[in-house]
Amino acid sequence: MSGKVSLVGAGPGDPMLLTRRGLELLEAADCVVYDRLVGRPILDLIPERAERVNVGKEASRHPVPQDEINRILLEKAQAGMNVVRLKGGDPFLFGRGGEELELLAEHGVPFEVVPGVTSALAAPAYAGIPATHRAFASSLHIVTGHAKAGGALNINFRALAESGGTLVFLMGVTSMGSICRGLLDAGMAPDTPAAMVESGTTPAQRKVVSTLSQLPREAADRGIHPPAVLIVGQVCSLSETFDWFDRLPLKGRAVVVTRPRERCGTLAARLRALGAETVELPCIATVPITPCPDLTQAVRRIGEYRTLVFTSPFGPGLFFDELRRQGMDARALAGLRIAVIGPRTGEAVEACGLRPDIVPQVYDTEHLAPLLTEGPVLLCRSQQGNPELTGDLRRRGVPFTEVSTYRTESGCPQSAEISPGSWVTFTSASTVEGFVRTVPRELLGSVTGFCIGRHTADAARKYGIRVQVAEKATIDDLVELILKEAAFL
Ligand code: SAH
């Protein structure tokens, strides 16, 4: 049976600008064919199992020829795959999307087109430039600034100059001088506001706002390079007033997020929305311990316990799996008090249909321990659990059983370029261990670690990392801590 090709617009760079349909198709893809303009944060959304085909290799400077791309799409679909053809911005705007569908149409291969947020609108928007404005422009013209090899620009400058609308040029960095000259020659005023926005919507976004006559020189002086859009028109004069992106509190900051991928989504997204460039470096992986005879035993004798404790969101699911395996359900826990370390773990308990009874004010083991007064306590947690908790129970003579249902493995499957002076978030001592093993030792003295919990901070200090500690073990507090540091500097 034939597969299908989805021509998906990846948007201009900010991964939050990928459409919901685009994401849905990407997550279900067997094969993703992408090119140069699609950025890392979007590529990170491609599932592990999907085949990736890069047809825009920049390093070798030999992008795959168009015919070849068309053929790859056809063959993969005919092999029964769900193929996503991922393109920067919108696939039908200077994206050769049409060409890629021709061969598919000819062979009767089903396809779908998912429009994307185009850089022609998004880059100006992130630079505070509205494409139109009632006071300034009543039309918008999107033009390619790409000249055929060796040829001149095929642009009707007079028509554009007379339109009085906003002009947006894509692929115009090299020909920026000729474009501005052409518009001036066609009669546009030299002081017409004009702007260049490089790498729009990404943490690397830069803008130059000037006039039609001065822009080419200023943009060259600032070293503006592709991808960039050139905007000409009165609307550019609003850029200063409407700028919002450059003013985000974490703009220009790189923050390394060390949680495992499946859990770093929210933290990374929060930081990105505040303007940070996030580097996702998952430093730990959580691995369930199977088989787990201790858990089997504890569940069999569940009626003997008075308090059940979970210290991370991984615990409840594994516990309930075992409960079900033994033919029981939540009713078996009727007489038990359930304690969790924080709200996220609480949510995991609630997902299993129960409500936690005990949540400490400060989300760490130190504050949880004194609340565990009714024994016997069944403690389901990581093999590397903090010994403070069991120590405290022992001291107070509260009987307990500790069961390790999972372990965290430190270490990083990938390496990443971490620059000296980076800001790094640590959510547990094992993320610290994983990070330390991944990056060069000499770097550690220069990084700042933003830690959840004292235990995590101690682990980081041991390696000479300067630390800031969040009071509560929540993402909110961690983000707050980073914002404070940014405001302080
Ligand atoms: N289909 C794409 C455009 C492809 S042509 C879209 O709709 O956005 C490639 C040109 O797009 C680049 O030369 C540049 O002019 C522009 N471009 C793409 N991404 C950009 C970005 N993040 N910032 C500024 N310009 C960008």
Image (cartoon, rainbow, N blue to C red):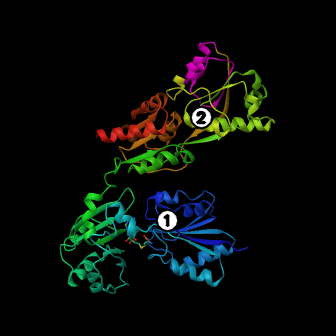
Q: Which residue is mark 1?
A: 10
Q: Residue at x 55, y 22 (%)?
A: 388
- Asked if one can make out residue 448 in the rendered structure from this viewpoint, the answer is no
Viewer can see residue 484: yes
Figure check: 150 above or below 19: below
State which mark lies toward you, 2 or 1: 2
Disc 2 + disc 1, Cβ < 8 Å: no
Viewport quadrant of the N terminus? bottom right
Residue located farthest toward the right when viewing the structure as drawn: 327
Q: Nearer the viewer, residue 304 or 405?
A: 304
Label 1 residue SS: loop
The residue that mark 2 highlights is 346
Q: Position of residue 279 (x, y in %)?
A: 45, 50
Image quarter of residue 82: bottom right
| N-terminal label among 2 and 1 | 1
User: Residue 391 at x, y = what percent?
Assistant: 58, 18
399 over 36 or under it: above or below: above
Mark 1: which amino acid? Answer: Ala
- The quadrant of the rendering that contains the C terminus is top left
Q: Residue, x 66% and y 81% (percent of image)?
A: 108
Q: Mark 2 and mark 1: span between their CA atoms?
A: 35 Å
Magenta extent: 368-397
Question: Quick check: is 391 in the magenta stretch?
Answer: yes
In-front residue for pair 198/407: 198
Asked whether mark 1 and ligand 1 are closer than 8 Å, the reply comes as no
Q: Does 188 lie within the magenta span?
A: no
State ligand 1's quadrant: bottom left
- State the image coordinates of residue 191 (x, y, percent, origin top left): 18, 72
Kind of residue at disc 2: Gly
Question: Residue 428 appears at what percent x and percent y?
Answer: 51, 35
Residue with the most extreme front position = 134
